Image (cartoon, rainbow, N blue to C red):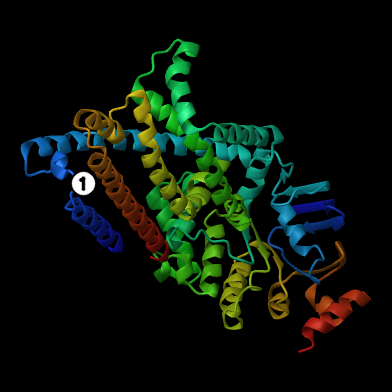
Amino acid sequence: MITVENISKKFGDFHALKSVSLEVLTGEKVVVCGPSGSGKSTLIRCINGLERHDDGLIEVAGHKLTHTNASLRAVRSSVGMVFQQFNLFPHLTVKQNLTLGPLRTRKLSQSDADKLAMSYLERVRIPEQADKYPRQLSGGQQQRVAIARSLCMEPQIMLFDEPTSALDPEMINEVLDVMSELAGSGMTMICVTHEMGFAKRVADTMVFMDHGEIVEKAPPEQFFSNPGTERCRDFLSKILAH
Amino acid sequence: MTFCRLAGLCCLALLLTGCSGNWGWYVVDPTVPAGLNNLKFLLSGLYYTLLLSFTAIVISIVLGLAVALPGLSSNRALRRFNRVYVELVRAVPILVLILWVYYGLPQMTGLTITVFWAGVIALALSDSAFEAEIFRAGIQSIDKGQYEAAHSISLSYTDTMVYVILPQAVRRILPALGNQLVYMLKMSSLVSVIGMQELTRKANELVVVEYRPLEIYTVLVLEYLVLILLVSAGVRWLERKLQSDQRG
């Protein structure tokens, strides 16, 4: 479903990604972890073209990513993305946030778009908030709206960029529950997260990144019980210590 | 409402000083027929002041936006166009631009330009450079995450601007746009020099007939004062309305 081959990315002198390769199968759930600055966010931002990779090849759902408008549109129409800071549109109601994409890019009628929006709001369990504005919602609710907004584009792949890092602790689970349910429905997912409990439950593959490289890639049982590298063991001991 | 009270106080103060002997309020006294006629004559300029200012502000906002967007492009030539336009237009005094558009432009192009449209073109051109800077600042103040979210749901550049970025930017720059409207109402008085029959021109003409500049120009000051206080109140009302929209 996703092929990443030897991609590199530099920000000035900083080497964010050094020849990274990753293969994600249809329906596979990949959880990416690693210290900050390790390139995990950059990796998934390259996959939907929010960052332009300098080198290498990215293919998503059969479309080669080339940064022409046509290629970006093709890739982004099959990839949904959820951001750490939610990035909801503050001047639109929850329902309008959800229907904007379907109305403008999928050319649905208003009533079809409304129906679609309500069905996804029910799926993330906040249909009663449809006519409120984002800032009237809690962080957890906002992130669920953001997930629903992506789902309204009916993507084949969902990317999550630290979706719970900006949330108060008591709101993390409501978002993880929605993500787990989504995983159960067979969606192809790449999640950058430090929620290791979620990773153990949901991931098919764990990826550990450090200094712009994929250091370790393994199924979760092996990844957590017997990490193959010193750096990964060190990282896990730090985040699992308490 | 404090503004209304302030305006009322000003009027009262002027009227009281009017009683002291040097003033001749009879020229604009609405209780006598001649005064009433003069007042009507002065107020008859209101139509063109408003029409001129509002036409010019609408055009200058559209023009300003059209100049601001290239300024935000990643293309260097487009950014250069934006800089050159803003610097050039900003450097021409508005009165000079009015004279040039009215007397110069028809000669250069062979077109006939009426006083009204010469005024609109000069005011709109002159203001568009400032509008462009306001729009640029407003658009740049919108968080990068908004663009990324728009990209992630595959919105085109135009849709991103129209549905996501500009509605938020306009809310932020509304006070600055309101300032420009006030500025435009005041600058429209300069178009009197080419014969536009707006408030200032009417006052000038009446002064020539009545020889009472103090009273007539005082009325003119009050006309602008009331007009601009009303417009300011309107802009603030719009700001509040848009803000409460966002809070629901």
> The N terminus of chain B lies in which quarter of the figure?
bottom left
Which chain is indicated by disc 1? B
Point out residue A177 in the picture as x, y percentages from the top left corner.
Answer: 58, 76
The quarter of the picture where the C terminus of chain B appears is bottom left
- Percent of width and height locating residue B195: 32, 24
B95 lies above or below B167: above
Give the left or right position of residue B183, taking residue B165 as reference.
left
| Quarter residue B183 falls in | top left
Identify the residue shown where x is 74% and y is 43%: A64
Residue at 12%, 35% in the rendered image? B37
- Helix, strand or loop for disc 1: loop
Please name the residue shown 58% across and 48% down the image.
Answer: B154
Q: Which residue bears the numbered disc 1?
A: B22
**A25 lies left or right of A9:** left
Classify 10 Å Cα crowding around label 1: few (below 14), some (14-19), many (20 and above): few
Residue nearest the observer in this picture, A110 or A13: A13
Number of callouts: 1
Identify residue type, mark 1.
Asn
Query: x and y percent of residue B75 in the render?
Result: 69, 36
